Amino acid sequence: VQTAFKGVAQVQAAADGRALGAVVAAMRAHTGSAGVQAWACWALSNITVGEEGAQRDTRAQAAADGGALGAVVAAMRAHTGSAGVQAWACWALSNITVGEEGAQRDTRAQAAAD
């Protein structure tokens, strides 16, 4: 999987900054736009991708805590006919819900399932 940034440091900076919140806010503000939803899911998948480890889990948890799971699921439900939304949403959900074994990962996976 290729990230939108050139390295782990940039991905972490996006997660630490306001990128996650801005993406989720855009998804909530433009629920009817399949294009916005697809690109937002793409962005979330790239922010939360990376090698297994504490930083990746921290980014995934930050995304979950910031409402990304609900926004991604809402996008999938609103745009069932959009292959782009569905594909990128699956990537985003996968990246947000996988990680080191533990209670946080299990909670994220359960939230996505609910």
Image (cartoon, rainbow, N blue to C red):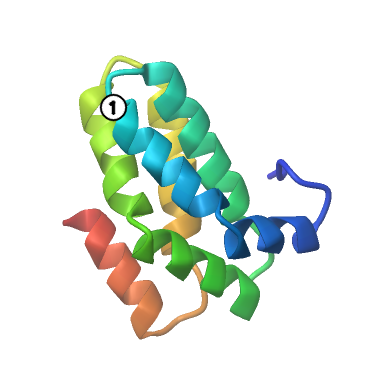
Indicate the quadrant containing the N terminus: top left, top right, bottom left or bottom right: top right
Which residue is nearer to you in this view: 64 or 93? 64
Q: Residue 90 appears in which quarter of the rendering?
A: top left
Image check: 54 left or right of 65? right
Q: Position of residue 27 (x, y in %)?
A: 37, 35
Q: What residue type is disc 1 on?
A: Thr
Q: Is residue 53 visible?
A: no
Total numbered badges shown on the rendered structure: 1
Residue farthest toward the top in the current orientation of the protein: 81
Q: Find numbered disc 1 in the image and state the secondary structure of the residue it sits on.
A: loop
Residue 82 in the image: above or below residue 49: above
Residue with the mark numbered 1: 31
Q: Residue 56 appears in which quarter of the rendering?
A: bottom right
Which residue is nearer to you in this view: 37 or 103? 37
Q: Position of residue 82 (x, y in %)?
A: 36, 17
Image check: 113 left or right of 103? left
Residue farthest toward the left in the current orientation of the protein: 114
Residue at 54%, 46% (x, y): give it: 45
Residue farthest toward the right in the current orientation of the protein: 6
Residue at 45%, 52% (x, y): give it: 21
Q: Position of residue 57 (x, y in %)?
A: 53, 73
Residue at 49%, 64% (x, y): give it: 60
